[in-house]
Amino acid sequence: MGHSYEDSKKLATKIITILAIITIAEVGLALLAKGYISESIHFPIAITGGIMIILSLIKAYLIVYEFMHMKYEVPGLVKSVLLPTLLLVWAVIAFFMEGDYWRNSRNYIKDKNESKVEMNDEVKQEGRLLEEKTYQSN
């Protein structure tokens, strides 16, 4: 950590400028992809989402590396901080996939409950006979 105050100030300003540029790029990409800047340009959501995730990961890396001083820590501590973070990302992805499965299952059951069953004439006649027999026995 043998940096002078001026060196640290220049480095912090450089990192903040990079973070600002990345943030402006993310906002611009989001507006452009949705067609708010130019109505003739629309990007697929998968490409837009992928680029946004990559840019966000770069920003997170810069923040953790520089402002949380991880570059000065021993490798064991860095791994003990980053490994749970990766597990958290994995858990979020797993929960989204599980939620998607449950949503699809719920919609399938809902559609099945709302569908009407067609009965042929033979079944309709048997049902009428059963109703008549029930009423006659009472």
Image (cartoon, rainbow, N blue to C red):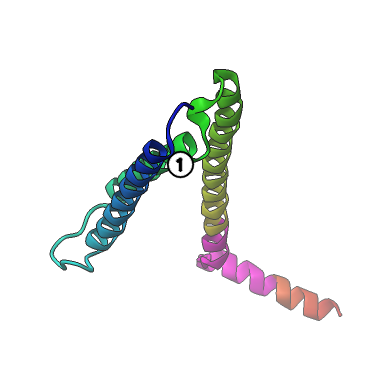
Whether residue 122 is in magenta: the answer is yes
Asked if residue 97 can be seen in this view, the reply is yes
Q: Quick check: 69 left or right of 128?
A: left
Q: Residue at x 56, y 51 (%)?
A: 105
Q: Position of residue 127 (x, y in %)?
A: 65, 70
From the image, tell me which residue sits under label 1.
63
Q: Quick check: 73 left or right of 56?
A: right
Whether residue 121 is in magenta: the answer is yes
- Overall secondary structure of the magenta stretch? helix
Q: Position of residue 4 (x, y in %)?
A: 42, 34
- Per the rendered image, the range of residues in magenta is 109-129
Along the viewing direction, whichever of 106 and 17 lies nearer the viewer = 17
Asked if residue 49 can be seen in this view, the reply is no
Q: Label 1: how many residues lie within 10 Å, few (<14), some (14-19) or many (20+)? A: some
Residue occupying the far left of the picture: 40
Tell me: residue 124, above or below residue 67: below
Q: Residue at x 79, y 75 (%)?
A: 134
Q: Identify residue type, mark 1.
A: Ile
Q: Quadrant of residue 33?
A: bottom left
Q: Position of residue 101 (x, y in %)?
A: 54, 47
The secondary structure type at the circle numbered 1 is: helix
Along the viewing direction, whichever of 78 and 101 lies nearer the viewer = 78
Q: Residue at x 25, y 52 (%)?
A: 44
Along the viewing direction, whichever of 32 and 69 lies nearer the viewer = 69
Where the C terminus falls, by quadrant? Answer: bottom right
Residue occupying the far right of the picture: 138
